[in-house]
Amino acid sequence: MSKGLAYFQQVYDEVPGWVQKMHDYSPVVLDHYTGLRGEIMQDGALSRKEKDVLLASMNAARLYARSMGYHTKGAIDYGSTIPELVEYLLVSYQYGGIDSLKVSMESLSYALELKGRPVEQPKKNPETIDEIIQTMITWIGDDDTSFLEDSLEIIKKGNPVEIEAKLLGDGLVSSRMKHLNMVGNYITELKGTDATDWMEKARDVGASEEDLADVGYICILTSGIPSWFEISDSLKLAKNKERHK
């Protein structure tokens, strides 16, 4: 087995079809992609755990369930708890509303399955915010659901300022990480201009330029090189680094 195939076998416990096909058509391309992915996903300013759970939430926000599933597994494998995952998934609601939260339910269901706690799917697909969050609370069971419950009450009041303050405020997950998540939501959809304000908000709650750069790097893995173009416009120049001409 090639290094590229072996890498993904280790990451996903199997070789995904898209990886096998990339190898079959060009093992060299797969090796280069594997090297890039391995470098980006190692611990840096952000940990491997944080990178996977951010990618799970960012893909929920843009309604891309396929990539969300891969990174949900990574998040659980690298130590994310169910309540932590849920707080990240609520950030997807802040970005994309009900549709993003519906996709998020697939992430939560899969995460619980990975934890050995398969859930019973509702007979009727939840449609309202109350139905969706109540279903999530039921699934989570004995884990801490207080953030979900409090968020639901605030969402139902309908005040956008209060909703943002709650969903992006400190909980089990820091406000810093949630703001980085929002940056990634815009960057993955190549909305760099819209991301600029969120990058400033992230800096205001403690995010460093290295944190933001790591968000840009992981966006490359799910949205390609154009996502780096979008975030780089608002990244500050690195300090104390030798610039190569």
Image (cartoon, helix red, strand yellow):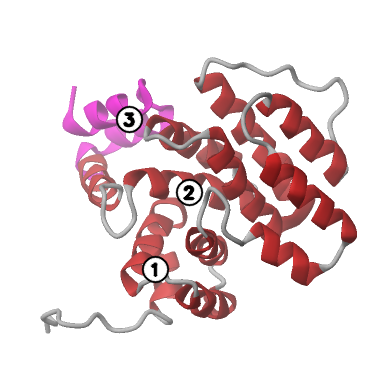
Q: Is residue 21 magenta?
A: yes
Badges 1 and 2: C-beta atoms under 8 Å apart?
no
Mark sitting on residue 55: 2
**Where is mark 3, residue-wise?**
11
CA separation, marks 1 and 3? 25 Å
CA separation, marks 1 and 2? 14 Å
Up/down of 222 relative to 217, above or below: above
Q: Secondary structure at mark 1?
A: helix
Residue 121 versus residue 37: which sits nearer the camera?
121
Rendering coords of residue 6 (x, y %): 23, 26
Type of amino acid under label 3: Val
**Where is mark 1, residue-wise?**
212
Where the C terminus falls, by quadrant? bottom left
Q: Secondary structure at mark 3?
A: helix
Left/right of residue 133 with respect to residue 75 in the rendered view: right
Rendering coords of residue 41 (x, y %): 30, 47
